[in-house]
Amino acid sequence: MAAPAAKLTPTQNSLLLHNRNHLVKPTSTNLPIATATTKPRPISISIKCAATATSPTPTAQPQDLEERVFNFAAGPATLPAHVIKKAQAELYNWGGSGMSVMEMSHRGKEFLSIIQKAEADLRALLNIPENYEVLFLQGGATTQFAAIPLNLVEPEDTVDYLVTGSWGDKAFKEAQKYSKPKVVWSGKAEKYTKIPSFDGLEQSPDAKYLHICGNETIHGVEFKDYPVARNGILVADMSSNFCSKPVDVSKFGLIYAGAQKNVGPSGVTIVIVRKDLVGNAQGITPVMLDYKIHAENKSLYNTPPCFGIYMCGLVFDDLLAQGGLEEVEKKNKKKADLLYNAIDASGGFYRCPVEKSVRSLMNVPFTLEKSDLEAEFIKEAAKEKMVQLKGHRSVGGMRASIYNAMPLAGVEKLVAFMKDFQAKHA
Amino acid sequence: MAAPAAKLTPTQNSLLLHNRNHLVKPTSTNLPIATATTKPRPISISIKCAATATSPTPTAQPQDLEERVFNFAAGPATLPAHVIKKAQAELYNWGGSGMSVMEMSHRGKEFLSIIQKAEADLRALLNIPENYEVLFLQGGATTQFAAIPLNLVEPEDTVDYLVTGSWGDKAFKEAQKYSKPKVVWSGKAEKYTKIPSFDGLEQSPDAKYLHICGNETIHGVEFKDYPVARNGILVADMSSNFCSKPVDVSKFGLIYAGAQKNVGPSGVTIVIVRKDLVGNAQGITPVMLDYKIHAENKSLYNTPPCFGIYMCGLVFDDLLAQGGLEEVEKKNKKKADLLYNAIDASGGFYRCPVEKSVRSLMNVPFTLEKSDLEAEFIKEAAKEKMVQLKGHRSVGGMRASIYNAMPLAGVEKLVAFMKDFQAKHA
């Protein structure tokens, strides 16, 4: 089949360069883009066809990238294009097994190799010490809001919650069923735009743990450093900034995260817990919420969310190939700086309410000075293939979630759009 | 690109006929197989290539089918080949949305259309009455073992469990944490090979519900009819025979099922519950186990397992296209009859321990009279691309799980292999 010569748009060129520089491991089957520049120019594309998509090194082709929108959703969220391509290529027949990952027995050698590699890669990424369990569970962070007190404390025990947003507040409320939680600080009165100084934090003398939400997805407030829990057990919900930057796991008793922001599809929840905290669940704990059961069975007590774990594994592999979380953090900072600078340089046309020192690298909430233009902003952006920019229904305004997999080109396009929109409406 | 002429093997021909007759909706892009017969003959195959797999009507091609094994796993289990092909075709760009289903906000219009169609199709398939909620949850049937007593009764309430296998036993044990369960009958002494007569069943006078496991995956024991619960609330775990035959939902207070046998990948649990039973959860119920929360939020209280729900939706759509569950049951009976007849006609070389009247249409356990040949049987079958035939580790022997998506050709091939193996070793 003869392939037509294709012209690349500036966005495609930018994406190709981005892929080449940051995301795609060089292979002999990559596109011949050595001559690509920022100036659009025709290149010849050779398309190899097969009846089934089993290319061993799938990469996103220019036509594919043109199909894609920039998806600023808060989660489930955009995934790396070439990771989805890889999943697509092997969806029907994984590794010559003659079946899809979705069809594999969770106790068969094929899936065991998948979950074991996923765990090993995650341990490498976060440098997780040996004395921590890594569990792949179901039910989202919301299930962990119950599982944490059920596993870590007794009903009469005091536990501390530092509430910097809606998710921390939900975690606190659920803990009331299984412990005596106290709010040691709440940002609610200031509409969750701050994180307090840790020096003045009055932790309960007898608190069994201190709970924080590492990044508040709705409010865009992110811990840049961490408080030290009075008794040494810091528990963190990292759902929306998991694997977006290096974290010293040894500072935590427990870290948990829903996968559907930075590392995979929804339906997988990752718990990293210090081994000495496992094994003392309250008697009323459902067996599926008992960390001991899952630790003893290597996350295979019952059927795990196999396909989701497989997708997380593909993402972990990709993050390692990028050079690990230090490199990932650099890219995330670059993207976030670009967007926050555009907001701050708009002369008040755009506003981000969050205190500068704790602004999230992942979720960027902003409003328009002329709030009656917000609906038009969202509508016009969608026409330009930038979607899911509406803020959470509880706070309004806009929110751009720019997780690991959001290409720099997506943020660049958004910033260019924002300047254009301002020029039209100033 | 010129396509080579391809010869079809007998198995391919059988599969093609099976697809044509039962699974694939006729489309103009289907293979030209009108002349296919049981006699192998060369046919010319025209392969249409595109840079991305976005064919609106993907079907499994002969080459693809040759790649596939017959997967007799108990779950996760084989899915319809053309359903996986459809998922593969739209994995990168669902319905022109510019994103994968895995990347979609669960509150966006695209995913809402997916989950709403999935629920509507399931309601149509099982003719679910209006006064029942349909919930798409996480955590597997094992999470429901706790959720059911937590939602339906108080801690001091008596509940009855009819235990016909390992799963019913696990459900009973978990219920001890949240209620006063009684075993009204257990098949354990007879190694779970029977179901009792309902006439002589001594239900507790004050039991708030009666729990059964509709099909015991490990032991291959299946209810063909259902007992009437003394107080009218029958609860059934249908994980391994869900949507394999028609069920009169109105006879049940609650039906639950993990998806990973007949209707999708692992990570989705479906609960069908009578509305008047929702809203009375015990105070210690984790919010994620409270049916009321999920019913009020249409399964979107937190982020659901979106991709898994999408896959279930594709399967529901396919089951409807097959003519609904009456047609599906006919096929399942034909497959099971073929296999059980082969076992029973082997003169004792193969044996199925289950009482004939309650043999499962889904899971067929059998042993070899010469048990030292079992390892060889499994090994030789695997060489012939029939995998996962080993019985559950708790019972040994062999088990062939022949769910909805196992083609007749797979059972025919297994039966032929069994006869051949017997001839060699008799």
Image (tube, coloured by chain):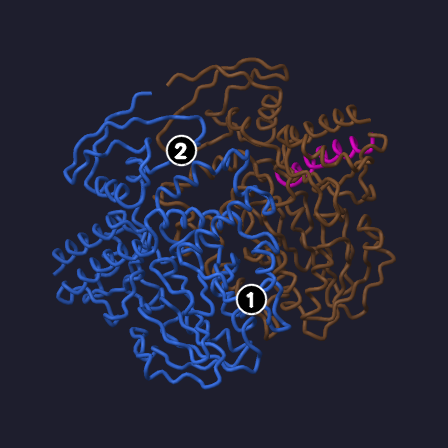
Chain colours: A brown, B blue
CA separation, marks 2 and 1?
A: 41 Å
* Amino acid of disc 1: Lys
> Visible in this render: residue A301?
no
The image shows residue A279 at horizontal and vertical percentages of 59, 69
- Asked if B375 appears above or below B181 in the picture, the reply is above
- Asked if A381 appears above or below A221 in the picture, the reply is above
Work out whether residue B14 or residue A202 is closer to the camera in this orientation and state it.
B14
Other-residue count near label 2 (Cα within 10 Å), few / some / many at <14 / 14–19 / ≥20: many
The image shows residue A22 at horizontal and vertical percentages of 60, 30
- Asked if B402 appears above or below A348 in the picture, the reply is below
The image shows residue A188 at horizontal and vertical percentages of 81, 55
Residue at 78% from the left image edge and 36% from the top image edge: A372
- Asked if A423 appears above or below A70 in the picture, the reply is above
Horizontally, is B278 left or right of B32 in the view? Answer: right
Asked if residue A344 lies in the magenta stretch, the reply is yes
Horizontally, is A165 left or right of A326 in the view? Answer: right
Q: Do discs 2 and 1 share a chain?
A: yes
* Amino acid of disc 2: Ala
Other-residue count near label 1 (Cα within 10 Å), few / some / many at <14 / 14–19 / ≥20: many
Horizontally, is B46 left or right of A83 in the view? Answer: left
The image shows residue A234 at horizontal and vertical percentages of 72, 59
Q: Nearer the viewer, mark 2 or mark 1?
A: 2
As helix, strand or loop, the secondary structure at mark 1 comes to helix
The magenta segment is A324-345
Residue at 55% from the left image edge and 31% from the top image edge: A24
Where residue A53 is drawn, which disc sits there? 2
Classified by dominant secondary structure, the portion drawn in magenta counts as helix
Residue at 59% from the left image edge and 55% from the top image edge: A140
- Per the image, the residue denoted by label 1 is A292
Judged from this view, the residue extending furthest toward the front is: B130
